[in-house]
Image (spheres, rainbow, N blue to C red):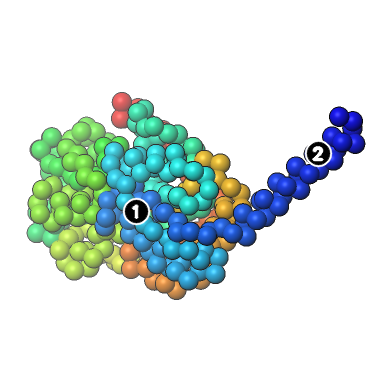
Amino acid sequence: MNIQAIFKFVSLLVVSWSFSNFSFAQSYPNKPIRLISPYGAGGNADLSARALSAALQGSPVIKEPIVVMNRVGAGGTIGSQFVKDSPNDGYTLLLARVGSQVVAPALDPVTPYKWDDFTIIGLLEIDPYVCVVRADSPFKTFQDLLDAVKKNPGKLTYASTGTLDASVVFPIKAFLNAGLNAKAALTVPYKGAGETVTAVLSGEVNFACNGLAPYIGNLSGGKMRALVVSTPERLASLPNTPTAQEVGMKNLELISGWNALYGPPNLSPNVVQQWSKVLNSLKENPKWVESSKTRGTIPSVMSPEESLKFISTQFKTYRDLLPYFQ
């Protein structure tokens, strides 16, 4: 084959690839998109996924339905692994959570994936962490709770959404700050934050520390009491609840929840670009903004590049805690 023929062949390949790429961009999506929530119904990931699906109904860009599917187990890693193993065509996406995407890879050596094995499309919102007890609990303040844990080592219990996620890291970090053993209270893992709500209300556990969204209704309704929040400033929805800094634990502000949209590895750049535009439009989407406010989350949409930087910092924060979990 002479040089001219080779040049012609390569040119045809480039044109073919460009046309295929353009054609794909024009046609995506042409069927429903599965949005995987790796935690149970009523939890942070599930609520966020359903809010996103509802807000994007009728979107001029994502015109097909977004079907939320819960694939739960192993602290969110089963659903996450399912997405990682899915085709990278944009029709199976993940509602990513801090626990399954950075805490588990940072602290649990058996996690079947690395924190950066996925295509990070964009951060959606920050989910302040809160420690809650039942309304009739004898613990009126966060210090009351810590004092009880100290007096009764290994006796008090708290609900979590896994064995190694932020709902475990938050109380353990608080115990360490107070000079207590990391296992001063017993972890009782559940499949999702929705189940931890029931666990606290029924008295199965003494307390829970997790993202605010699943608890906001019972806090507003007077069935639960919040003892501390992870935000630098007090939340408007919980004006009487002190911040971590106010209870003398400023570094607990680093332990906070977040929701993001991920795809399988090597997701098409065209799909990422389309979704990035869609997520950016959420800032002006009244349905999504109102939903975020109702759930107690803080809208924090970021570009893929900004999200990668934020999430890599989060991973380092939790990896630095590894010595306390070995």
Using the rendered image of the protein, determine whether residue 80 is visible from the camera's viewpoint.
yes
Count neighbours of disc 1 (C-alpha within 10 A) and say few if under 14, some if 14 to 19, many if 20 or more.
some
Relative to the observer, which residue lies in front, 131 or 123? Answer: 123
Can you say whether 81 is above or below 136 in the image? above
In which quadrant of the rendered image does the N terminus lie? top right
Q: Is residue 271 left or right of residue 11?
A: left
| Marks 2 and 1, the one that precedes in the sequence | 2
Q: Residue at x 31, y 51 (%)?
A: 70
Image x and y of residue 13, in percent: 75, 42
For badge 2, the amino acid type reads: Phe
Q: Which mark is residue 9?
A: 2
Please name whichever residue, 262 or 286, is drawn nearer the observer in this view of the structure.
262
Residue drawn at (34%, 53%) of the image: 69
Side of 161 relative to 273 (left or right): left
Q: Quadrant of residue 148?
A: top left
Quadrant of image for the C terminus: top left
What residue do we see at 12% from left, 41% from top?
Answer: 156
